Protein backbone atom coordinates (compact mmCIF):
# COMPACT_ATOMS: atom_id res chain seq x y z
CA UNK A 1 0.00 0.00 0.00
CA UNK A 2 2.81 2.43 0.88
CA UNK A 3 4.47 1.66 -2.44
CA UNK A 4 1.27 2.55 -4.37
CA UNK A 5 0.86 5.81 -2.48
CA UNK A 6 4.52 6.68 -3.16
CA UNK A 7 4.12 5.93 -6.91
CA UNK A 8 0.91 7.99 -7.13
CA UNK A 9 2.64 10.82 -5.28
CA UNK A 10 5.60 10.76 -7.67
CA UNK A 11 3.31 10.76 -10.72
CA UNK A 12 1.40 13.70 -9.28
CA UNK A 13 4.61 15.59 -8.49
CA UNK A 14 6.07 14.89 -11.93
CA UNK A 15 2.86 16.08 -13.61
CA UNK A 16 2.82 19.32 -11.66
CA UNK A 17 6.51 20.03 -12.34
CA UNK A 18 5.75 20.50 -16.03
CA UNK A 19 2.62 22.57 -15.43
CA UNK A 20 2.82 25.80 -17.38
CA UNK A 21 0.51 28.66 -18.25
CA UNK A 22 -0.40 29.38 -21.87
CA UNK A 23 2.46 30.49 -24.11
CA UNK A 24 2.56 32.30 -27.48
CA UNK A 25 0.88 30.20 -30.19
CA UNK A 26 -1.04 27.97 -27.74
CA UNK A 27 -4.77 27.92 -27.04
CA UNK A 28 -6.95 26.91 -24.13
CA UNK A 29 -10.61 26.04 -23.58
CA UNK A 30 -12.38 27.29 -20.46
CA UNK A 31 -15.59 25.74 -19.08
CA UNK A 32 -17.24 27.65 -16.24
CA UNK A 33 -20.17 27.90 -13.89
CA UNK A 34 -20.92 31.46 -12.84
CA UNK A 35 -22.67 33.57 -10.26
CA UNK A 36 -25.39 35.93 -11.45
CA UNK A 37 -27.82 37.88 -9.32
CA UNK A 38 -31.30 36.68 -10.26
CA UNK A 39 -30.29 34.75 -13.39
CA UNK A 40 -29.85 31.23 -12.14
CA UNK A 41 -26.55 29.46 -12.68
CA UNK A 42 -24.82 30.71 -15.87
CA UNK A 43 -22.73 28.23 -17.85
CA UNK A 44 -20.03 29.46 -20.21
CA UNK A 45 -17.49 28.08 -22.66
CA UNK A 46 -14.61 30.07 -24.12
CA UNK A 47 -11.39 29.76 -26.09
CA UNK A 48 -8.28 31.88 -25.52
CA UNK A 49 -5.31 32.17 -27.89
CA UNK A 50 -1.91 33.53 -26.83
CA UNK A 51 -0.64 36.16 -29.28
CA UNK A 52 2.29 36.82 -26.91
CA UNK A 53 3.53 35.03 -23.77
CA UNK A 54 1.78 37.72 -21.71
CA UNK A 55 -1.29 38.54 -23.90
CA UNK A 56 -4.30 36.41 -24.90
CA UNK A 57 -7.38 37.15 -26.97
CA UNK A 58 -10.49 35.02 -26.91
CA UNK A 59 -14.20 34.47 -27.44
CA UNK A 60 -16.81 33.23 -25.01
CA UNK A 61 -20.45 32.20 -25.05
CA UNK A 62 -22.66 32.02 -21.94
CA UNK A 63 -26.20 30.91 -21.17
CA UNK A 64 -28.49 31.04 -18.14
CA UNK A 65 -32.17 30.53 -17.44
CA UNK A 66 -34.34 31.21 -14.41
CA UNK A 67 -37.98 30.59 -13.55
CA UNK A 68 -39.63 33.40 -11.64
CA UNK A 69 -42.90 33.59 -9.73
CA UNK A 70 -45.96 32.47 -11.62
CA UNK A 71 -45.43 31.41 -15.21
CA UNK A 72 -42.55 33.78 -16.03
CA UNK A 73 -39.33 32.24 -17.33
CA UNK A 74 -36.31 34.33 -18.29
CA UNK A 75 -33.34 33.30 -20.35
CA UNK A 76 -30.09 35.04 -21.17
CA UNK A 77 -27.48 34.44 -23.85
CA UNK A 78 -24.21 36.31 -24.20
CA UNK A 79 -21.33 36.17 -26.66
CA UNK A 80 -18.21 38.27 -26.46
CA UNK A 81 -14.56 38.88 -27.22
CA UNK A 82 -11.92 39.44 -24.57
CA UNK A 83 -8.31 40.38 -24.16
CA UNK A 84 -6.16 39.63 -21.11
CA UNK A 85 -2.72 40.59 -19.89
CA UNK A 86 -0.97 37.82 -17.90
CA UNK A 87 1.25 39.16 -15.09
CA UNK A 88 3.60 36.18 -14.65
CA UNK A 89 6.60 37.72 -16.43
CA UNK A 90 6.16 41.18 -14.91
CA UNK A 91 5.67 39.90 -11.34
CA UNK A 92 7.92 36.81 -11.65
CA UNK A 93 5.06 34.43 -10.76
CA UNK A 94 5.81 30.69 -11.25
CA UNK A 95 4.31 29.34 -14.49
CA UNK A 96 2.06 26.78 -12.80
CA UNK A 97 0.09 29.87 -11.70
CA UNK A 98 -1.53 32.25 -14.19
CA UNK A 99 -2.68 35.67 -12.93
CA UNK A 100 -4.40 37.95 -15.44
CA UNK A 101 -6.63 41.00 -15.96
CA UNK A 102 -8.35 42.33 -19.02
CA UNK A 103 -11.49 43.56 -20.73
CA UNK A 104 -14.49 41.99 -22.46
CA UNK A 105 -16.85 43.38 -25.08
CA UNK A 106 -20.02 41.29 -25.21
CA UNK A 107 -23.52 41.22 -26.65
CA UNK A 108 -26.11 40.08 -24.10
CA UNK A 109 -29.64 39.06 -25.09
CA UNK A 110 -32.43 38.71 -22.54
CA UNK A 111 -35.83 37.16 -23.27
CA UNK A 112 -38.88 36.25 -21.21
CA UNK A 113 -41.84 33.93 -21.61
CA UNK A 114 -45.15 34.27 -19.84
CA UNK A 115 -47.57 31.33 -20.17
CA UNK A 116 -45.50 30.09 -23.11
CA UNK A 117 -45.67 33.43 -25.02
CA UNK A 118 -42.68 35.72 -25.63
CA UNK A 119 -42.88 39.23 -24.24
CA UNK A 120 -40.47 42.11 -23.76
CA UNK A 121 -40.32 42.78 -20.03
CA UNK A 122 -37.97 45.77 -20.34
CA UNK A 123 -39.51 47.37 -23.46
CA UNK A 124 -36.52 46.54 -25.69
CA UNK A 125 -33.93 48.08 -23.36
CA UNK A 126 -32.51 44.93 -21.79
CA UNK A 127 -30.43 43.46 -24.60
CA UNK A 128 -27.33 45.08 -26.03
CA UNK A 129 -23.58 45.44 -26.03
CA UNK A 130 -21.67 45.75 -22.78
CA UNK A 131 -18.05 46.45 -21.89
CA UNK A 132 -16.50 45.25 -18.64
CA UNK A 133 -13.23 44.33 -16.98
CA UNK A 134 -12.14 41.09 -15.34
CA UNK A 135 -9.40 39.71 -13.12
CA UNK A 136 -8.62 36.05 -12.59
CA UNK A 137 -6.21 33.31 -11.86
CA UNK A 138 -5.46 29.68 -12.74
CA UNK A 139 -3.50 26.89 -11.14
CA UNK A 140 -2.16 24.21 -13.51
CA UNK A 141 -2.27 20.76 -11.92
CA UNK A 142 -0.71 19.19 -15.00
CA UNK A 143 0.82 20.43 -18.24
CA UNK A 144 -2.63 20.89 -19.77
CA UNK A 145 -5.25 21.04 -16.98
CA UNK A 146 -5.97 23.93 -14.61
CA UNK A 147 -8.63 25.17 -12.23
CA UNK A 148 -9.51 28.84 -12.47
CA UNK A 149 -11.58 31.60 -10.94
CA UNK A 150 -12.50 34.97 -12.44
CA UNK A 151 -14.27 38.09 -11.17
CA UNK A 152 -16.01 40.50 -13.52
CA UNK A 153 -16.43 40.12 -17.27
CA UNK A 154 -18.83 41.36 -19.92
CA UNK A 155 -21.80 39.16 -19.13
CA UNK A 156 -24.64 38.60 -16.70
CA UNK A 157 -22.16 36.30 -14.91
CA UNK A 158 -20.09 39.38 -14.04
CA UNK A 159 -20.24 38.52 -10.37
CA UNK A 160 -17.73 35.79 -11.00
CA UNK A 161 -17.20 32.30 -12.34
CA UNK A 162 -15.07 29.25 -11.70
CA UNK A 163 -14.20 26.22 -13.74
CA UNK A 164 -11.61 24.21 -15.59
CA UNK A 165 -9.12 25.10 -18.31
CA UNK A 166 -7.66 22.68 -20.84
CA UNK A 167 -4.58 23.97 -22.71
CA UNK A 168 -3.71 22.60 -26.17
Image (spheres, grey):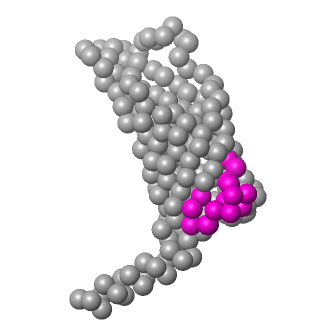
The image shows residue 113, relative to residue 12, as above or below, that is: above
Q: Give the percent coordinates (x, y) of residue 69.
A: 27, 16
User: Is residue 110 depicted above or below 132 in this figure?
Assistant: above
Q: In which quarter of the image is residue 63?
A: top left
Q: Tell me the quarter of the image containing the N terminus.
A: bottom left
Residue 151 is at least partly visible in this image: yes
Q: Is residue 130 left or right of residue 3?
A: right
Q: Residue at x 68, y 63 (%)?
A: 92
For the image, the number of numbered tags is: 0
Is 92 situated left or right of 113 in this image?
right
Find the magenta span and give its range.
84-98
Q: Quadrant of residue 17?
A: bottom right
Would you place residue 114 above or below residue 3 in this image?
Answer: above
| Residue 78 in view (yes/no) | no
Q: x, y percentage for residue 55? A: 72, 53
Any magenta on residue 91? yes
Q: Which residue is drawn at 64% across and 45% down?
A: 101
**Residue 153 x %, y %:** 57, 36
Quadrant in the rendering for residue 112: top left
Residue most extreme to the right: 52
For this orientation, the residue located farthest to the front is: 91
Residue 37 in the image: above or below residue 23: above
In the rendered image, the residue lying farthest to the bottom is: 3
Tell me which residue sits at (50%, 74%) in the image: 16
Q: In this view, does 76 lie to the left or right of 102?
A: left
Residue 4 position in % (x across, y down): 30, 88
Extreme residue in the top direction = 123
Identify which residue is drawn at 49% across, 49% down: 149
Image quarter where the C terminus lies is bottom right
Amino acid sequence: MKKRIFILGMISLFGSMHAQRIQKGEAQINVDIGVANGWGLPVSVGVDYAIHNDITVGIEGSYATEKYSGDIKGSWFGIGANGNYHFNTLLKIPNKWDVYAGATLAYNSFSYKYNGSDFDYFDGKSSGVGFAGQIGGRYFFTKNLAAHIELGGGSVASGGKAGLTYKF
